[in-house]
């Protein structure tokens, strides 16, 4: 189904149409097969790059598209609807460019950003570690100054695109000062002393490689640090605010695909002498699915418009991520129900969608963590109003 | 080199295509319009020729207002400018009339090379290259699967069922291309932004010197007398293999006159 969108300009319409057409003919036809074979479609990212889709929300000065988040996210949604691995991959790539684009010095941006946005390179974002998932501030991979370089040791875990990416935007510990002891480095994939673990054997999103980065005396020039020493966690969390909008858009795309599949099946399948789409029991299920998809879309778009206007959107991004990913889990599960036995087989894509919907509830901050972020932001507004004046226990937010 | 690509907007081949009850013309309103698939190959070929030999690629479209979407797509793929022939008098024109109208515009804007797709997915006449060549008194090199240009000499591989012919001519000429010829590029986002600034000339019949008494449904040389909608798909025949599956399948193919 062609999603009815309200886009801000004719160019935005053509851009989304380009993404839709490309997704329909280049991504969707091969998605199931690649996922079944655990194959990463690296060449499709080059195609997206050639079409100018790998740098959309960044400034034209460095080769980006200068596109608003409102529009970029809808492009992302179209791609994710055809193939979640590609949607998530683009979202991660975009996030991996954020620290340089936002916190890099101009010399740094001039040197690296154009290539990162031009489309040939693919990025990864490395925050999590085996012992530091939700509690990111507990990360322990170390960077020790050595002349003009840092020497790195330690392990990053669960890294999307590990082994496939050309650069890694990684958070590493540069001092023992807890949250203030983390720095952000832009690491070239070919750095000696950087190795990759075996890909995780996952429940879904099997086309997208997830693996460890293992640093063993990897030498990274200090000039590749983005922002100040100790600023790394703040950078990482700010990047996540935008990243979560990307994940919300991907989840909406995935749910839309599940809804489309359900509608087509329900219209074509007859039982008791009637198309099953006419039974009220299914009508209400389909209506609830559509309501979920469209309200989640509205939620991420509202957050995106705030971002585009320069308004705070931290709480709204978490709400969008929470709402959209929980919705996608429910809608994809219901899609399997609509297709009945067929839905449970791998001859139809909805069981895969259901497996793919699970991980957005987990990565870029689990949905428990999103609720914490939202609740803390609520308390902060109260505090700013003066209502919660003496509540001294407000924690830092992880 | 001045290359003109003729581009037709056709109904999305993924959607159900219908004829209108009243005048048996194609219902273009109710479905999305797309660039005719083979025309994308024509655009790609024109762009490749331009990239190799310099020159300018002009897109020429005849069609209603909606067809400007297809023009914009061609421009965002990389064509340099466009001419849109649009006039209510043209509605319902058949292939003869369309070739007359396009030829008039082509005489007006000039050309060294005209590139077409070998046929359109809606009408499927596959005769436009021949008609334009005749009307413009230039050679036609149709069904090209490969094009080589050397100065003013043009050489193409003309695809046929069991191989290809090598045919040569002198420019100016008309060529039509088949799918084998290349892999059309996607527009890029930068192309989309650049397309906005490219010149698009709108022409009426009067502008192009087209005699309106020769075009349009009322004056067409051909007429769709009647049509019926395609019957709904029937359930297939299931052959159960009880050791003789091969024979049964063959028998079925014989009854269908496939073998
Ligand atoms: C496919 C995949 C791709 C990933 N890609 C990346 C990537 O590219 N880069 C990257 O840095 N990371 C990536 N991750 C890691 C991901 O972000 C983490 O898995 C996630 O943050 C959760 O951390 P954890 O797995 O250690 O779970 P834990 O933090 O151990 O959490 C386990 C459970 O405890 C709950 N929990 C933890 N703390 C609290 C609390 N305070 N209150 C309530 N509940 C709590 C969690 O919600 C969860 O349910 C990826 C993960 C997956 C599965």
Image (tube, grey):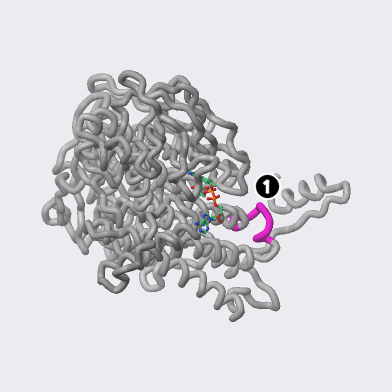
Dividing the picture into quadrants, the one containing residue A382 is bottom left
- Return the x and y of residue A89 as percentages of the image width and height: 45, 43
In the figure, is residue A177 to the left or right of A285? Answer: left
Q: Nearer the viewer, residue A155 or A338?
A: A155
- Residue at 16% across, 48% down: B200
A90 drawn magenta: no
Above or below for A371 versus A138? below
The image shows a total of numbered marks equal to 1
Q: Main secondary structure of the magenta part?
A: loop
Please provide percent x and percent y for residue B108.
Answer: 14, 43
User: Can residue A340 be spotted in the picture?
Assistant: yes
State the residue lying farthest toward the left: B207
- Residue projecting furthest to the bottom: A280
Direction right: furthest residue = B243
Quadrant where the image shows the N terminus of chain A: bottom left
SS at circle 1: loop
Q: Is residue B130 visible?
A: no
Q: Chain of mark 1?
A: B
Is A348 inside the magenta-drawn segment?
yes
Residue nearest the observer in this picture, A123 or A73: A123
Please state the horizontal and vertical placement of residue B19, each as a whole percent of the image. Answer: 42, 66
In the foreground, A135 or B168:
A135
User: B9 or B220: which is nearer to us?
Assistant: B9
Up-down: is A259 above or below B114?
Answer: below
Residue for badge 1: B258
Residue at the spot x=35%, y=62% of the render? A315
Which quadrant of the structure image shows residue B231? bottom right
Q: Which residues are magenta?
A: A342-350
User: Label 1: few (<14), some or many (≥20) within 10 Å?
Assistant: few
């Amino acid at each position: 189904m062609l999603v009815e969108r309200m886009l801000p300009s004719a160019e935005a319409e053509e851009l989304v149409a380009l993404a839709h057409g490309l997704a329909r003919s280049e991504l969707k036809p091969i998605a199931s097969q690649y996922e079944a074979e655990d194959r990463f479609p690296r060449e499709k990212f080059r195609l997206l790059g050639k079409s100018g889709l790998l740098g959309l929300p960044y400034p034209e000065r460095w080769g980006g598209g200068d596109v608003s988040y409102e529009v970029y996210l809808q492009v992302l949604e179209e791609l994710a609807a055809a193939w979640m691995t590609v949607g998530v991959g683009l979202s991660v790539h975009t996030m991996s460019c954020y620290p340089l684009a936002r916190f890099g010095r101009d010399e740094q941006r001039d040197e690296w950003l154009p290539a990162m946005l031009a489309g040939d390179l693919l990025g990864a974002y490395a925050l999590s570690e085996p012992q530091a998932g939700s509690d990111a501030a507990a990360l322990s991979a170390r960077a020790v100054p050595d002349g003009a370089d840092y020497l790195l040791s330690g392990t990053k875990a669960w890294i999307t695109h590990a082994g496939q990416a050309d650069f890694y935007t990684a958070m590493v510990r540069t001092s023992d000062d807890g949250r203030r002891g983390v720095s952000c480095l832009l690491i070239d994939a070919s750095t000696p002393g950087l190795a990759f673990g075996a890909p995780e054997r996952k429940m879904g999103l099997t086309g997208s490689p997830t693996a460890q980065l293992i640093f063993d005396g990897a030498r990274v020039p200090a000039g590749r640090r983005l922002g100040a020493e100790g600023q790394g966690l703040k950078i990482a969390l700010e990047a996540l605010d935008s990243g979560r909008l990307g994940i919300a858009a991907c989840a909406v795309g995935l749910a839309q695909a599940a809804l489309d599949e359900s509608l087509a099946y329900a219209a074509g399948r007859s039982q008791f002498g009637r198309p099953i789409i006419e039974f009220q029991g299914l009508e209400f299920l389909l209506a609830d699915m559509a309501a979920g998809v469209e309200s989640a879309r509205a939620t991420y778009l509202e957050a995106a418009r705030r971002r585009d206007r320069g308004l705070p959107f931290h709480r709204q991004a978490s709400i969008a991520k929470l709402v959209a990913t929980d919705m996608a889990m429910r809608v994809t599960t219901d899609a399997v129900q609509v297709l009945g036995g067929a839905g449970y087989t791998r001859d139809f894509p909805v069981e895969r969608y259901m497996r793919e919907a699970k991980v957005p509830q987990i990565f870029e901050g689990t949905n428990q963590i999103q609720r914490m972020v939202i609740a803390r932001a609520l308390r902060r507004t109260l505090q700013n109003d003066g209502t919660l004046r003496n509540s001294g226990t407000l924690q830092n937010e992880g | 080199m001045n290359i003109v690509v003729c581009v037709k907007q056709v109904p999305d081949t993924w959607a159900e295509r219908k004829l209108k009850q009243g005048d048996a013309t194609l219902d273009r309103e109710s479905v999305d319009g797309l660039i005719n698939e083979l025309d994308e190959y024509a655009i790609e070929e024109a762009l490749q020729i331009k990239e190799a030999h310099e020159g300018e690629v002009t897109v020429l479209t005849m069609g209603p207002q909606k067809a400007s979407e297809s023009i914009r797509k061609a421009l965002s793929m990389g064509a340099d400018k466009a001419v849109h022939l649009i006039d209510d008098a043209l509605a319902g024109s058949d292939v003869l009339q369309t070739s007359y109208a396009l030829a008039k515009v082509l005489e007006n804007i000039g050309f060294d090379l005209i590139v077409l797709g070998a046929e359109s997915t809606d009408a499927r006449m596959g005769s436009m290259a021949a008609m334009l060549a005749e009307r413009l008194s230039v050679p036609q090199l149709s069904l090209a699967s490969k094009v080589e240009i050397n100065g003013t000499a043009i050489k193409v591989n003309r695809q046929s069922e069991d191989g290809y012919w090598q045919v040569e001519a002198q420019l100016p000429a008309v060529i039509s291309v088949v799918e084998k010829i290349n892999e059309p590029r996607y527009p890029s986002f930068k192309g989309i932004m650049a397309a906005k600034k490219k010149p698009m000339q709108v022409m009426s019949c009067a502008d192009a010197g087209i005699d309106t008494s020769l075009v349009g449904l009322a004056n067409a040389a051909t007429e769709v007398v009647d049509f019926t909608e395609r019957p709904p798909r029937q359930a297939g025949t299931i052959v159960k293999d009880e050791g003789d599956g091969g024979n049964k399948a063959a028998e079925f193919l014989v009854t269908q006159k496939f073998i």
